[in-house]
Amino acid sequence: MNALVAIRAAATAPAADAAGTPVQAVALSGIEVRFGALSVIQAMSLSVREGEFVALLGPSGCGKSTLLKVIAGLVPVASGTVSVGPATRRLGMMFQKPLLLPWRTILSNTLLPVELQRGRGGVGAADRQRALELLALIGLRDFADAYPHQLSGGMQQRAALARTLMSDPDLLLLDEPFGALDELTRERLNEELVSLWRSGVTRLKTVIMVTHSVPEAVTMSDRVVVLAPRPARVVDSLDIALGYPRDATDIALVNLIAETRALVRGVM
Ligand SMILES: Nc1ncnc2c1ncn2[C@@H]1O[C@H](COP(=O)(O)OP(=O)(O)OP(=O)(O)O)[C@@H](O)[C@H]1O
Ligand SMILES: [Mg+2]
């Protein structure tokens, strides 16, 4: 097992300030997002505590990707307020498509965040080592020198995750990160991601992940937020009060998955 995820014991308890008030990593208050005449998000309020892992579920086209882009500051709101931080210094975003640069190798794509931050001359041996470790973690170590077109869709997604983690984010936004993967690889990477988040060996604290999989949402997160069809707004928020690591056969987990599935079915 890679050193990056070797420490699995430390739980990531949500952070609190001196007065015990949870620190908000993201706070959206009454936001509306429009694309021309199309209202995509309406009257949405959502707070995510620092240290929380929140999964977003909602029907296709409801505005989930747009919501992540709003949090990342890439899409403006027509009204309402968006605040990120104050402790968030680095925001990492993995888009729904891999968006790898076709003329760069997988290693060189993974190193891109460091290069953008420090310039080409600023990439050192330690950065290359870390990039190779991340590629090993996601099962792409043997493809470090390959080009994106030589990889399958799922492999490209994994490379995009390695690149996102390379920026060492404290807030991680994931848009259906493993949609194109086979079930077993997906389960393994989900476990690695949760381990990484909980381990405390990186600066990663808060994760907001869009997924279409109810079991994935419930198994991975502290809280599942269910969104209404467009225009998106929060219809429900379920706390998943189970410890980690989670056992797929645990009856409490199985029941929560069934409960969440029924809820989502009622919305779609
Ligand atoms: N840049 C854009 N310009 C115009 N319309 C857009 C733009 N981006 C998204 N939309 C519209 O906003 C709505 C929500 O899109 P979004 O990509 O956020 O949905 P989603 O919930 O992520 O869907 P999926 O689950 O299929 O990925 C859609 O109707 C889409 O057509
Ligand atoms: Mg989307």
Image (cartoon, rainbow, N blue to C red):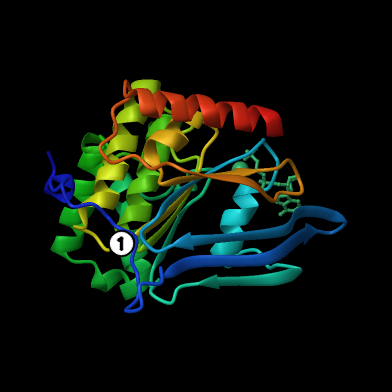
Residue bearing the label numbered 1: 168
Q: Position of residue 180 (x, y in %)?
A: 47, 29
The amino acid type of the residue labelled 1 equals Asp
Q: Is residue 207 above or below residue 141?
A: below
Label 1 crowd (10 A; few <14 / some 14-19 / many >=20): some
- Between 129 and 3, the residue placed more toward the observer is 3
Q: Quadrant of the C terminus?
A: top right
Q: Is residue 169 visible?
A: yes
Q: Is mark 1 within 8 Å of ligand 2?
A: no
Q: Position of residue 39 (x, y in %)?
A: 81, 54
In the image, 19 versus 82, the foreground residue is 19
In what quadrant does ligand 2 lie? top right
Is any part of residue 180 visible from this angle?
no
Indicate the quadrant where residue 220 lies.
Answer: top left
Is 255 above or below relative to 84? above
- Answer left or right for 100 relative to 226: left
Rendered location of residue 57, percent (x, y):
57, 39
Residue 72 vs residue 196: left or right?
Answer: right
- Which residue is depicted at the point 38% across and 28% down? 252
Residue shown at the point (68%, 48%) measured from the top left: 63
Is disc 1 placed on a helix, strand or loop?
loop
